[in-house]
Image (spheres, grey):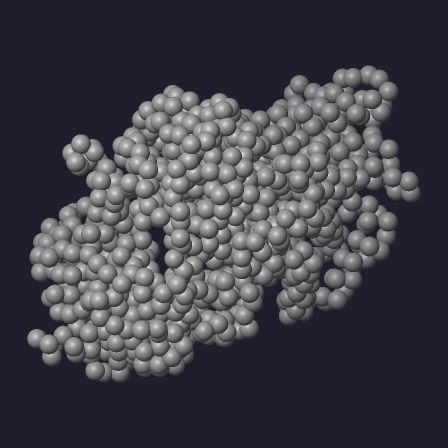
Amino acid sequence: MTGESTRLSVEARGISKAFGGVAALDAVDFEVRWSEVHALVGENGAGKTTLCNILAGIYRADAGQVIVDGTERDFRSPAHAIDAGIGMVHQHFRLVEPMTVSENIHLGWPETPGVVSQRALNERTEQFMGEMGLHVDPTAKIWQLSVGEQQRVEILRVLARGARVLILDEPTAVLTAKEAEDLFAVVRELAASGLSVIFITHKLREVLAVSDRLTVLRHGIREITRPTEGATASEIARLMTGEERVLNVEHRVVTGDPALELRGVSALNDRGITALHDVDLTVRSGEILGIAGVSGNGQTELAEVICALRGLESGSITVDGADVGSMSVRAVTDMGVGHIPEDRIGMGMVLSAPVKDNAVLHNYWTEQFSQGLNLNRQGVIDFAKRLVEAARVQTRSVFATAGQLSGGNQQRLVARREALVADQLLVAAHPTRGLDVNAAQEVRSTILDKRDSGCAVLLISDDLDEVLLMSDRIAVIYEGRIMGVFDAADADREPIGLLMGGHSSTEAA
Amino acid sequence: MTPLASIASAVLSVTPWRLERRLEVDARRAALTRIGGAVGAMIVVGILLLLTGRNAFWIFWQALDAVFGRQRGIEGVALRAIPILMTALGVALSLRMKVWNIGSDGQFLMGALAAVGVGIHLDGPGWLVLILMAVAATLAGAAWILVPALARAYWDVNEIITTLLLNFVALQLVTWSALGFWRDKAAAVIQSTREVPFTLPGIPGANSVTIALLVPLVIAAILWWVFRSTTIGYEIDTIGGNPRAAGFAGIAVRRRILVVMLFTGAIAGLGGMLQLSAPGAQAMNAGFSAQFGLSGFIVAALAGAAFWGVIGGGLFIASMFYAGIVLQTKGLSVYIIFAIYGVILTGIALGEIAARYRVVRREAADESEATAGEEAAAPQGAGS
């Protein structure tokens, strides 16, 4: 079968594409074989999605050829690409939420019978799922499904249209760890049945876990294509970033005064269900306490209750010895509590407002900017300029709206702003989520600098690698309860992983 | 996207062009594009008039002459502008917070009604009664929006419906007052309330315009300053931009919404008193408000809630209405005049879109010279 498996399914030759005069791809060659999972790796902006959008007929290349199974193609629309057997599953799903799985799979599919009963539709769907070895309840409405199941419907939809080359754009970005594992199995299965899968990601563990070969893009140029076997994470990271930039974090044991203390804290989520049960936590000045856990286990509520954005049901919270449980948001902020919120865009910024106004969102009322009613406009502008420079935010000016910034720049801005607010405590919720390696390193350096300057840091992240890397101590949260606290020195991935999944430490031992 | 911008972009979707949002909206361009829109619309109107065999030049000359050619015209415009400006300023303030106060007509009427109540029942020196009338009108305007404001601020009840419906209640109350409890029994023909015996002092040299004209100018200046230089303005803009971010910043969002909505009602209510205190308008009848609130709303929306833009736009629309009335007396059909209003307002609205968007060719858009912002935006669409 070697002959079969080295035959090319898709070949891109010398693909170039520019946006607004900026080259996104520069003469990129890219070859994918049948029966392989091919990881396409690179930082944000490296050109991964652009390349795949060209393969899938969404963009047209400025130069270069696309050859599918030996035939040169010129795709003018995604429909042309799917006719040639190339289908893409996007990061943001394109499903009709109130309709069933069967209906979504059959929607706009030329083979859907003109008149068909719901039952026949479901039977066709069942049969098709059987052929593909992928299962979702065909009668379920999309909105009833978990994100992982919705993604499976998307994959089925693309496969139903005869795709033999499947492109998955950052498919694990929205998945839980368990769902990601399931996806890997599906992807391996599809490749084993003869399909090509192009797997776009910037997570190195995934590359190593799922792919047969890998291609690294950097700044729109192909760095390497090689078999995954024998590749190491640090080698791929070096190729992605162009330099060896491994953050060297020294874990400490801190014995100073507690900057933040939670005693028996309980709180409700937005639906009125108890999301935090009797939480006890201590963070000392000059240490990072990492909260490890799968998203949705009370982390959001934990951050909000500390910053007074959410009411306390019972228990007490003290910052620097002062009870903040009944304080206003502003009073807590004035204690020197910074907060990088989980939902940067939804909560941490005003996208329609200029960068300068966003720069002072969390401290505009302080003496630095406000005298009585008066807001010191020049002071705000100067501060924003310094902040933008220090955080290396790329923007034309501080008067441009925050909505014009790219996601990474928005995040850098918020992280640096909150670091300046935080004298006592920085609550950082998923501070590097969605960032590429370089931007993530910068945000992490910002947080480590805060720690080194004596600030306490509560780091919430669903990326266990990050928690292990950054934290001095690690607390594991599961269903709103703290399952255990470890010193970083003797923290082990496996027991923590088990606790994150709800297995108690005795079971784990 | 505003509804009109959505329509414009839908129309463009069948052409090789498309709308692209500008990175920054600068105030000078915003003003120029609106003026350009109005001028362009008038050229269109002129061509249409010529094509239908009318003497467009004569009509435009008559309109200009009616408005600017004589003192009566200028004063007529000023008298019409005052109520429009007051309601428009109230609406513009609410729009800064993304609250849609459609009820400024009702608040205007209730303000006037309260002023009449004070004016016809209190004896005393004229200046004192006028001040009390202004206070009563301000409070009444605020009171008329109190329930919608509470409902919006604390129970998230959509204010568009509640404020709109209260307009009709206010109109009925005014009618009742004119026909019933405050009816002027001496005047047999026209059903109206009794007349307030006081008027505001006139502007020196004017026949009918009083110092009421200064009030919207002062309010616009105050609002402009508040939004330019104070933390309150910053907070209101933040609430309008993203209420969750405002909560994150510790702003008492609900209380702010309540207070700002009360202010918008108060400004419209005061407008009612100003209208009532002009010579010859000192009594109320069912036709007291010629839908000034609606005109005010149009002005505020077209001005993009910029306060000096409201002043300019309000004066323009008042001139347009005044010219329209004069042209009717010169024999131009009322339907043609309404059609002209419509074309001109559409022109200004297109100018408003032009301030925030530009038209680019679809293919060429990718090659157009890049600005830093677009570079930052490109990888978002292209790479991540």
Residue B152, percent from left and from top: 51, 32
Quadrant of the rendered image containing residue A252: top left
Percent across and percent down for residue A420 are: 55, 43
User: In front: A22, or A290?
Assistant: A290
Residue B91 can be seen, yes or no: no
Name the foreground residue: B233 vs A227.
Answer: A227
Q: Is B77 left, or right, of A334 in this rendering? A: right
Please state, as top left, top right, bottom left or bottom right, where the N terminus of chain A lies in the image.
bottom left
The residue lying furthest to the right in this view is: B205
State the residue in front, B305 or A272: A272
Quarter residue B43 falls in: bottom right
Question: Residue at horizontal 87%, vertical 39%?
Answer: B203
| Residue A429: percent from left, percent from top | 41, 42
Q: Position of residue A26 (x, y in %)?
A: 41, 77
Identify the residue at image location x=40%, y=72%.
Answer: A220
The residue sitting at 69% across, 58% down in the picture is B28
Note whether A165 is above or below B135 in the view shown: below
Quarter holding residue A279: top left
Viewer-nearest residue: A229 or A415: A229
Q: In the drawing, does residue A404 fall left or right of residue A115?
A: right
Relative side of A402 to B287, left or right: left
Q: On the rendered image, what quadrant is the C terminus of chain A found in?
A: top left
**Residue in the picture at 71% in, 23% down:** B136
